[in-house]
């Protein structure tokens, strides 16, 4: 029988809160989609692949498929149901069995794919993997929590993907129904077909929230590798502005020029953190082309960068930062600055300072520089 896998990857990942569509979020150096495609590449059963991706993401998706003969990339829709429809429309005419799989389930073991296909080959119109529900279930409403009469969990299962179907039946079912469905089995049932269950696998959990990326990283065994970023920033003195440095205001000192408040210490930390997370750099996120950041308190950059990190399942575990310049004298306020930075970053920050023996722009007293190292770990 000819088998095709439709990998639906066109969702935005709103619950993950990432700046990229979820399938293009990085997990241990590879996008979620790349993890899925590579895993499928190891499947012993011959199959073709249809990738359903968001508008504008076709090229990076195609680049993943150079060694997958017959693979296709199509653009998804506003809902999962619409994306599956787009994927089904791209199936080869000779497809006997189609599996619909969420790209968000990157770690689903291949033996689940086998079980699903085998159930369809054995005569079921459709087969879905499910896992046991381990928590007691209750019915909840905004006003009350009803613990009595909750559904019996022994009769319930958590539904996963891949969901497999006789291709012609699933296509006809999607043609026969209207509206949105949370999975493909629901479409089949609506069209009057029976769908059987096979054993799923808890490792095939759906990456939905940032914590799920952490869980996936630790399953992949790579969470022990810290990510490191290093960055520097320099600003020139500007007598007409108050000095903001290391999150503090320095009365009676010359300020630093800049699009924002010119705090080179916070800028270096933010830049290094973005680099460590493979999220680009400070200029890309907060550059002069962003008028909303003119004169901004640099702690705003930091909190925005930290939320981007969090959406990637990452957090800052440690920071080292050095100020380079003749003035202000850091020593008397070093501990205060260190504590302020530690509170802003939410992780230990070590601060030190140096001069450059009268050499260079900081030595000539033209400005202040800072260099930061940031270490990230999974949340
Ligand atoms: N999906 C899709 N097209 C959509 C919505 C979802 O292809 N318009 C895909 C997702 O890419 C994902 C799968 O359907 O692989 C399951 O959806 P879900 O986990 O809900 O992903 P998102 O919709 O991207 O996330 P969220 O609901 O948090 O926005
Ligand atoms: Mg969704």
Image (cartoon, rainbow, N blue to C red):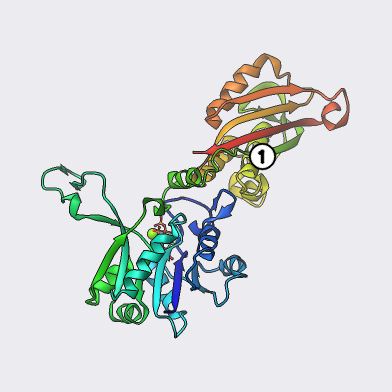
| Count of number-bearing discs | 1
Question: In terms of image quadrants, where is residue 78?
Answer: bottom left
Front-most of 54 and 369? 54
Image: 250 above or below 65: above
x 36%, y 54%: residue = 201
The residue tagged 1 is 229
Mark 1 lies on a secondary structure that is: strand
Image: 256 above or below 113: above
Image: 367 above or below 223: above
What crowding class fits label 1: few (fewer than 14 Cα within 10 Å), some (14-19), or many (20 or more)?
many
x 18%, y 55%: residue = 155
Answer with left or right where residue 151 lies relative to residue 284. left
Q: Is mark 1 within 8 Å of ligand 1?
A: no
Answer with left or right where residue 243 lies relative to residue 318. right
Which quadrant of the rendered structure holds the N terminus? bottom left
Residue 140 coordinates in the image, percent (x, y): 20, 47
């Amino acid at each position: 029988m000819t088998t095709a896998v439709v990998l639906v990857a066109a969702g935005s990942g709103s619950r993950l809160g990432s700046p990229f569509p979820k399938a293009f979020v990085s997990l241990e150096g590879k996008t979620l989609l790349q993890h899925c495609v590579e895993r499928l590449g190891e499947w012993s059963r011959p199959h073709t692949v249809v990738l359903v991706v968001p508008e504008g993401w076709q090229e990076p998706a195609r680049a993943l498929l150079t060694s997958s003969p017959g693979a296709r990339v199509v653009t998804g829709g506003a809902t999962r149901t619409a994306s599956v429809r787009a994927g089904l429309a791209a199936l080869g005419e000779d497809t006997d069995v189609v599996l619909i799989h969420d790209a968000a389930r990157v770690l689903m073991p291949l033996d689940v794919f086998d079980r699903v296909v085998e159930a369809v080959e054995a005569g079921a119109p459709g087969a879905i993997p499910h896992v046991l529900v381990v928590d007691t279930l209750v019915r909840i409403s905004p006003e009350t929590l009803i613990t009595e009469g909750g559904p019996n969990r022994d009769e319930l299962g958590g539904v996963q993907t891949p969901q497999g179907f006789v291709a012609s039946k699933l296509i006809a079912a999607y043609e026969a129904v209207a509206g949105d469905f949370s999975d493909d089995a629901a479409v089949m049932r609506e069209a009057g077909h029976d769908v059987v269950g096979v054993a799923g696998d808890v490792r095939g959990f759906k990456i939905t929230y940032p914590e799920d990326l952490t869980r996936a990283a630790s399953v992949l065994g790579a969470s022990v590798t810290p990510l490191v970023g290093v960055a520097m920033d320099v600003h020139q003195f500007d007598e007409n502005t108050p000095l903001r440095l290391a999150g503090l205001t320095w009365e009676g000192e010359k300020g630093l020029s800049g699009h924002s408040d010119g705090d080179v210490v916070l800028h270096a930390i933010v830049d290094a953190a973005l680099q460590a997370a493979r999220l680009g750099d400070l200029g890309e996120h907060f550059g002069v082309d962003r008028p909303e950041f003119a004169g901004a308190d640099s702690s705003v950059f930091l909190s925005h960068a930290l939320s981007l990190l969090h959406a990637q399942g990452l957090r800052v575990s440690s920071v080292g930062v050095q100020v380079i310049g003749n003035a202000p004298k850091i020593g008397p306020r070093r501990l205060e600055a260190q504590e302020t930075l530690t509170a802003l970053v939410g992780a230990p920050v070590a601060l030190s300072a140096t001069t450059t023996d009268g050499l260079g722009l900081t030595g000539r007293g033209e400005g202040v520089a800072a260099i930061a190292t940031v270490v990230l770990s999974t949340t």
